[in-house]
Image (cartoon, grey):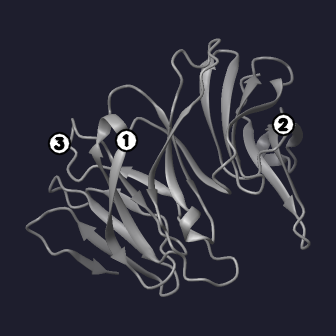
Amino acid sequence: DGLTDILASQVCKNIFGQQSGSLVWFEQPKSDVTKTGSWNKNSLVPGPDFLITTEMLNETTVIVYSAQFFDAKLVYYYLRIGVDKPYIVGGDGTVIDDTIGSVEGIQIVDVLKNGKKQILVNNHLANGSLTGVFLYEFPDNFPYGTSDKFIKHQIASGFNTTGGVGVGAPGFCTLFDLNAEQDKSEPYKIGVAGDGNFISWQLTATDPQTFSYSKSIIKSVGGTSGILAFGDVDGDGYTEAFVPYYEDGIIYVYTANPDARKYHST
């Protein structure tokens, strides 16, 4: 109908630990959106309970990738659009992985910059020995008739937490280059927010062909390490890293420029 709608995940969780998630479509009213307070909500499929990301397959189909935190699964769905009422094709979706615990962050990426995409996810757990960052290679010819599985690579592990109720790690991931011009042919670095691990990390590819990565510390903040942001804010060609320290309300600013100061806080 030419109007932009909203696709979202929804979760309801009560104090006794029970929860239910679903993929919902909010339909924009055909009347003036600024003059009405209600968008029509349509539940499409049970399951999605945290972050989603989407990819257009063709003019009539969207692939919805779902990081399911409470259901502890990584799943994708086919959503048919271009019809009066969008709907999910093929039932309750296809499980990519249900072995890594609570799935938190999810992105479709090309970490090697070679035109081949992967799914980048992190789990979020209290047990540091089970924590990790993962890349999933797409099967050849996905999604057209392939029966092959996604190939999983755990590229980082051991995000130990400090304990306490509700504390988990790691946090969300962010791709970056140290120098956009110099690193054109290099795989992206991956910044990882430690969250309850209290450390912000950099993952660097050591063998791109096998998706092997080293893990190094950007900053140990001594408290909750929030989502990292990266950008060349001073125009010198080198990337700056912004490291949030939640409890103290501090953002540490690091630079990749080897001739500059390592960081300052603001």
Q: Earlier in the sequence, mark 3 or mark 2?
A: 2
Residue sitting at the far top? 145
Relative to 92, 185 lies left or right: left
30 over 18 or under it: above or below: above
Q: What is the secondary structure assignment of the residue under circle 2? A: loop
Which residue is labeled 2 in the image? Answer: 29
Whether residue 86 is visible here, answered yes or no, is no
Residue type at numbered disc 1: Phe
Quadrant assignment, res 265: bottom left
Q: Residue at x 39, y 71 (%)?
A: 243
| Label drawn at residue 211 | 1
Q: Residues within 10 Å of mark 2 (few under 14, many from 20)?
A: some
Q: CA distance from mark 3 to mark 1?
A: 23 Å
Whether residue 156 is visible here, answered yes or no, is yes
Which residue is labeled 3 in the image? Answer: 181
Q: What is the secondary structure assignment of the residue under circle 3? A: loop
Image spot of residue 170 (x, y percent): 53, 65
Residue sitting at the far left? 259
Image spot of residue 221 (x, y percent): 40, 81
Residue type at numbered disc 3: Glu
Relative to 52, 259 lies left or right: left
Image spot of residue 114 (x, y percent): 32, 27
Relative to 33, 162 lies left or right: left
Q: CA distance from mark 3 to mark 2?
A: 45 Å
Image quarter hosting the C terminus: bottom left
Q: What is the secondary structure assignment of the residue under circle 1? A: loop
